[in-house]
Image (cartoon, grey):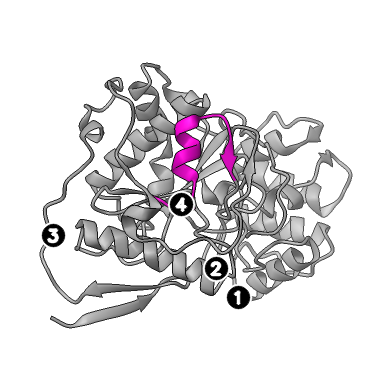
Amino acid sequence: MARRLSVTRRGFVLGGLSAGALLAFGSPAWASAPTGGPLTDAGPDIIDCAGWAARPNSDIVPIWNQRPVKILVHHTASANQADVGRGAADGLARAIQNFHMDVRGWLDTGQHFTISRGGFVLEGRHRSLEVLRLGKRQVEGAHCTGQNVVAVGIENEGTYIDQDPPQALWESLRTTCAYICTQYGIAPTELYGHRDFKNTACPGDRLYGMLPQLRSEVAGLLGQRVEGAQTQKASWPLLQPGDAGDTVLAAQYLLRDAGVPVATDGRFTPAMADAVRRYQVTTGAEDPNGILGGESWPVLARTVTRGDGSDADRAVDTLAAGRNVEAVPDEVDHPAWQRLLGTTGTPTNTAVDPEGPPR
């Protein structure tokens, strides 16, 4: 059978089979706990770096004398391949490490843990598992600038823009998150998507939309109960080419307020993407990609005094009129912006780490 190579959005090369039926998978013993049921043993089965034949790290892995306070969920943006066996999981981990070290120039894999479509959980960066088992310190990752010391990063194999993750992956994700929460004392509501802090579609619309469910199920595994509004986190909308409507128009007014020329027509055109990229360059975004997400919104949505006649005030008017909001505060700060944008929820943990460039 022919072997196909594909380059993912993140750039690393993966091999897959050109055809084939979905294979049976084995999941860790404690991943089979009923949804909402409590954990009953010490933790999930996690394959360490030696287990998947990782390369040695090229430099000392930094370890901080502090506990992380949140978990960030990613997807690999690679093919949703049918091979869900252990060999495929090991190959995924090696491909990610090769890309991160050989192309990105990092000292090791960027994320702390990786979960395959077959539900296998693998250590990503060296010493992540050892340090997690102790539960007192944090391995510095390279999965999200600004969050690498305060957040544990979990990559989930596949692309989840218009597909849900397979059940095996989901079970392992929720139990791994529950174990991390247990070890570090992280609240089950402190689970986020990559896009909450960066200008990216990661972890995909479908997986991102499942985060409230993940928070609820992780809480259940911990013997806690969180429902409804507690599972919703305040966030920022993701805007990209092809989008249209009041939110895009408000963003256009905010760009003009920031001194970036752009048409105010409510359409996210290629010209608007160029305007967003220019803004991202001036504000020091790590990857000026023209996508407006969790990294650029907090800078763009400045505090506005109502009635000041600015383009930012016009953005407020646009959102208030489009959503029939009558009570708009005299001063529109980040929580007020998020309510107007329709992305309100419990406050996001905004802790930012002291790390330097990814390594």
Q: Amino acid at mark 2?
A: Pro
The answer for how far apart the CA atoms under marks 4 and 1 are is 26 Å
Indicate the quadrant where residue 341 lies.
top right
Q: Nearer the viewer, mark 1 or mark 3?
A: 3
Query: What residue is at 29 percent from the left and 23 percent from the top?
Result: 41
Q: Position of residue 229 (x, y in %)?
A: 49, 25
Tag 1 or tag 4, which sits nearer the N-term?
4
Q: Nearer the viewer, mark 4 or mark 1?
A: 4
Q: Compare residues 114 and 7 and report the one nearer the observer.
A: 114
The answer for how far apart the CA atoms under marks 4 and 3 are is 23 Å
Question: What is the count of numbered marks?
Answer: 4
Q: Which residues lie in the magenta part?
A: 123-139
Indicate the quadrant where residue 353 lies.
top right
**Crowding at label 4, few (<14), some or many (≥20) Cα neighbours within 10 Å?**
many
Q: Is residue 176 found inside the magenta-colored segment of the image?
A: no
Q: Amino acid at mark 3?
A: Leu
The local secondary structure at tag 3 comes to loop
Indicate the quadrant where residue 19 lies.
bottom left
- Report if the CB atoms under discs 4 and 3 are less than 8 Å apart: no
Q: Amino acid at mark 1?
A: Pro
Query: What residue is at 34 percent from the left and 28 percent from the top?
Result: 217
Tag 3 or tag 2, which sits nearer the N-term?
3
Tag 3 or tag 4, which sits nearer the N-term?
3
- Report if the CB atoms under discs 2 and 1 are less than 8 Å apart: yes
